[in-house]
Amino acid sequence: MKLLILIFIGLLSISANAEVGDCEWEKDLLNNQHEGLLNRKTICDNLEKVTTEAELKNALEYFYWEARSIMDTETDRHKLNKKLNKCEPTEESKALVIAFEGTGAYEPLIPATMARFNKCLGGKVDPKLRDKIYSTMESLYKEKRGKERKWSGLNRGVMSELLTMKQSRSVDWYSFPSEESEVLAGLDEAMDLKSWRGILGDAKNSIQSNPKGIQNARDCITQYLAKAKELKIKPKIVVTSHSSGGRSLVKFAEHMKKAGVDIDLAFSVDPVIEAHHAIEEVIPQLAGEPYRNKEYWAKKKSNEKLGTNWALPEYSFSAVWTRDHKDKLYKASNVKVHKNFYQTQDRKGLDLGGDFGRFGIRGSQMHGADNKYIEFKAYNDGWGGHGNINSDPEVLKQFRDSMNALLKE
């Protein structure tokens, strides 16, 4: 296969990792290195287009191992974030994307793999494979790591869209977590009582609008812009987010304003306030849900047990509701263009806790931004609207058009 042959003879070597499903072709790669024969850019320039799912999987697998080798044995997501995010432009860089994931969505290895894939094969992916990029990455992660990934709306949506864009190789993408508290991150470490020692520190950082994910993002952009200055280039600055990452986007923008940095484009998808505040809103609703729906349950049980035919009233779900958060969700004054997309139909949320613990997550407008409401016509799409909005055709079109406009300037 020409794609793999070219990769075999040119790209950087990768140290072997003892992991489930370790592949033989990695050993072939190590055996076929020709130091200095071709540089990485030349090889990537001459790679053929990715037109099949098999080619997509093989290429993603290569960049998976490249990113995996950098991780070594580190497990802390913030330290991994530092390791995996190089935060340096090249002479061809035209835009930097800082992405803030939603609660429990940041999986360090996946966006790092996709970003490396993009810098080599971005723009060479057949658009018909767009919806296969993230699903292939999910399968690959489970195969190699032996566990499920954390689901990311940004990786599934706008990042996958980016990889199919003609000029995407000129875009540098770095992802960051948004949670204020490690306990909300869904990490294995959260099961360890030692990790709870950091809660007070997380709370303090939250009050100062500077949780660890934002700290790392600030360090990243500082390093990136310093290198860009050395190269005498001025890449566009883009910040994107999903869910509680929307609040992180605003906090980050305010930090950038203090640093004298303008943001060319903010692109937020279904933003909500900080996760711990959202949960505070939901808990009383969940407690009152049985009482609110007593008529529903009485008639439902009657229909099931007694064969009656009562028309069931609409079920009153608990949810993080769409609200006006002018002081938390807004367009910062140093943001040139802010596009925001939100929905109000979700009943699935993070899909945790089964029927009893499930609650909807409904995004809000960003005050002062260009807000667009996304309506789902199909019930099933609306049920999981907080996740499905990420791959909505209008959202993806707006992202593509916005990025293309920036890259042409």
Image (cartoon, grey):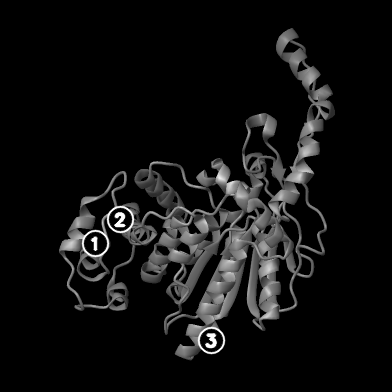
Q: Residues within 10 Å of mark 3 (few under 14, many from 20)?
A: some
Amino acid type at image mark 2: Asn
Q: Tell me the CA gap for discs 3 and 2.
A: 34 Å
Q: Earlier in the sequence, mark 3 or mark 2?
A: 2
Kindly indicate the quadrant of the structure image that contains residue 384: top right
Kindly indicate the quadrant of the structure image that contains residue 114: bottom left
Secondary structure beneath dot 2 equals: helix
Q: Quadrant of the N terminus?
A: bottom left
Residue matched to label 1: 4
Foreground pick, 215 / 100:
215
Q: Position of residue 243 (x, y in %)?
A: 66, 55
Please name the residue shown 43% across and 82% down the image: 92
- In the displayed structure, 72 sits above or below 314; it is below
What's the mark number on residue 59? none
Q: Is residue 112 visible?
A: yes
Choose mark 3 or mark 2, whichever is in front.
3
Total numbered circles: 3
Secondary structure beneath dot 1 equals: helix
Residue matched to label 2: 58
- In the displayed structure, 127 sits above or below 18; it is below
Q: Position of residue 306 (x, y in %)?
A: 75, 8
20 to the left or right of 108: left
Foreground pick, 68 / 82:
82
Please name the residue shown 19% across and 75% down the image: 35
Disc 3 + disc 1, Cβ < 8 Å? no
Please name the residue shown 30% across and 75% down the image: 40
Residue matched to label 3: 234
Disc 1 + disc 2, Cβ < 8 Å? yes
Kindly indicate the quadrant of the structure image that contains residue 190: top right
Amino acid type at image mark 3: Lys
288 to the left or right of 259: right
